[in-house]
Image (spheres, coloured by chain):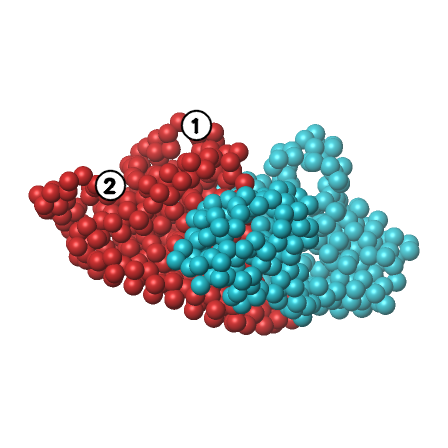
Chain colours: A cyan, B red
Amino acid sequence: MSIDILMPALSPTMTEGTLAKWLVKEGDSVSSGDVIAEIETDKATMEVEAVDEGVIAKIVVGEGSENVAVNSVIAVLAEEDEDASSVSAGASAPAAPISRAATPEAATPEAVAPAASVSAAPASPAPEAEAEWDGPTKTLSVREALRDAMAEEMRSNDQVFLMGEEVAEYNGAYKVSQGLLDEFGSKRVIDTPITEQGFTGIAVGAAFMGLRPIVEFMTFNFAMQAIDQIINSAAKTLYMSGGQIKSPIVFRGANGAASRVAAQHSQCYGSWYSHIPGLHVVSPCSPADAKGLLKSAIRSETPVVFLENELLYGDTGEVPDSDDWTVPIGKAKIVRQGSDVTITAFSIMVKKALAAADALAEQGISAEVIDLRSLRPLDTETILASVRKTNRIVTCEEGWGQSGIGAEISARVMEQAFDYLDAPVTRVYGEDVPMPYAANLEQLALPQAEHIVEAAKAVCYK
Amino acid sequence: MPTFADNGDGGCARKILLKAIAKALHMTHSNADDYLRMYRQMVRIRTFEDNANQLYLSAKMPGLTHMYSGEEAVAVGICEALKTSDKITSTHRGHGHCVAKGADFKEMFCELLGKEEGYCRGKGGSMHIADQSNGNLGANAIVGGSMGIATGAAFSAKLLGKDDVAVCFFGDGATAQGLMYEVMNMAALWKLPVIYACENNGYSEYTRTDEIAAGSITARAEAFGIEAFQVDGQDVLAVNDLSQKLVERCRKGEGPFFIELMTYRYHGHHVGDINREYYRSKSEEKDWRENRDPITRFRAWLVEEGIASEEEIEAMNAAIKADASEAVEYALNAKYPDASEVDMHVFTDVEHALA
């Protein structure tokens, strides 16, 4: 049986090429791997290797032929025991030239339409807000609330474990894991070397196996070492594997600027991680939200990036005193009702937004403050409902403005509540510089309550 | 070890001796079925790759693909020492690992062609193929990217008190990635049941390994106190024998281990890498293909040992070829994923992320 030698596709984009040179002639014997021709594309000159053994029975496309389509027959090979002279061109099924552009991948536009659709902002299910708590509470710091969340979940599920630098013997660099080693032992509270990419990779592997790791980054600045594991492995594998492999894992630690630790230790990663489909990102402010969201994160089958703030660890507040109490991921919380302007914030900026709202009240402006709590899924509905009421919105974040959370909110409000706006969406964010060290400069680089006040007054035209 | 290049006078005494050595070395694999299965799996990989190569060259397969041809004894020698519940992680050159760990042609070709019946529903492709049912945690297309995952699988086995072992396949090129050193350090500290299997095919993409790796590869592992071995990766029995011993030792808590498997990739770095003479010579390629091919060598040994006749082997090869053709045909005609699939499996708790 004769075998057609086809014009090969030597790159993902090649559709045609020039048959520059034949290195064999009719009647020559070739074996697998022999170079038989050279072809040229606009990018390179490449050799064509024989795939099968046999005798070149006929050269169909001559030297110098241009625009030879991929998959067209360029020669015919007769097998060793065959009479080469009896073979005619295209004796086996003539291969219709197929260009890559015409492959069915490209011919199914409906398969891409949803992703390209303008209104397809990353959707989130609208979770029910947590039930109003009228049971007993206790006063806890954010630090204690986080510890209690981990301890309760570790008690109820032996698949949960904590891993990170100094989390066990030292009780955590910020003492968040206080007492966990004593209660759960070194098998489940694991000190690692200073090796973020390594222990994150190990934890992701453990999550693939069905365990529920909590990875503590001493601060999220160091998670940059591990970001490939978080994004390429934890966030994408469910999709890449067609739903076969889940990664129920929590990445938690201090995020954002602390005090006077300068550029490499002061950065908000909220917008970075919220960019990634496959991740959930939360960043609470209050002790009650810290506990309720961390419990939800540990129970989630989706990888969760849990952004804490060093300056909030010591803040205290009332926390529902129950193992069953959780806060849903993806649900913002209105922390102050108002009617004139909506202010969104997360993490430490919620405190500044509330301070700004107090100052605004003194000037006769009623501000509604929304604690986003979750950055992905972002609770667009709560934001839009507030904007429909106040007709104005100021977004606040500590991170840089470009491609930030405020930029995303601005786009969604414009797309979905344009007609309700009485003023442009206005953003308050960190100055577009690496964090300076000097105290006065650091103050200048960080967004302050007065910036929020100014922005709110501006959108109220006051 | 059995001598494959046994072209000498080959007296009866020598054959008996060879058999005795083989038997002694393969206490747990001392029957013909195991040898034949190893042969069959190697031919299945070669046949799979020949077909994948053709699909790519004929523009029926999209993207990028990297052929495993020439390295079959590595994946098969190791995976034949594993149970289904043992885990592997794989690389961009991962079809061989996937076949060796038990995957079926049909689902694999469907995945390569982006069809709904593929192992990953057509959403992973050649470089991300995963087969959870057989313990393949997936190919990772970031060089060295799966080293943490394999180590984490071993960590899980230890935490849960299971005797499962994890094998991390990676190439010589990945030894330049920092992750390897980070996870070997912890694996050694925590005595994890993981085997780091470095497939040294002599080239890191388009560069000779000795130009990208200073010093010895095995010494890297030894620096962490990890026992390291170098083995002829073209000799499936040698690979399997070593793997069986190390897997058993891992199950007893004696891991981790490191193996450098000396092997060769017949094709370029990827299918389109045709002009290779600037980084390796055709005579070198010819020498490996003609004198060190793992399938040819093992086939000769099987015949010499009387384990299979030439006719039986030819029949086996033909059956595998027919299987592959049938699977390719099936995959070519299989349906693409439904458009609704585009936003599925983004989050576990949302069926359609864009809904």
Q: Amino acid at mark 1?
A: Ala
Quarter containing the N terminus of chain B: top left
Which is nearer the eye, A23 or B313?
Answer: A23
A21 with respect to A156 (left or right): right
Q: What residue is drawn where x is 33% and y is 54%?
A: B42
Q: Is residue A276 visible?
A: no
Q: Quadrant of residue B288?
A: top left
> Are dots 1 and 2 in contact, CB under 8 Å?
no
Identify the subunit bearing mark 1: B
Q: Which residue is mark 2?
A: B5
The answer to whether dots 1 and 2 both sit on one chain is yes
Q: What residue is drawn where x is 16% and y is 47%?
A: B22
Q: Which residue is mark 1?
A: B214
Graded by Cα atoms within 10 Å as few (under 14), some (14 to 19) or many (20 or more), the crowding at tag 2 reads few
Give the secondary structure at mark 2.
Answer: loop
Give the secondary structure at mark 1.
Answer: loop
A379 with respect to A35 (left or right): right
- Residue A62 x %, y %: 62, 51
Q: Which mark is residue A138?
A: none
Count of labels in the image? 2
A2 with respect to A442 (left or right): left
Residue found at the very far left of the displayed protein:
B13
How far, Cα to Cα, is label 1 from label 2? 32 Å
Which is nearer the eye, A40 or B155?
Answer: A40
Nearer the viewer's eye, disc 1 or disc 2?
Answer: 2
Identify the subunit bearing mark 2: B
Which is nearer the eye, A308 or A178?
Answer: A308
- Residue A395 x %, y %: 76, 54
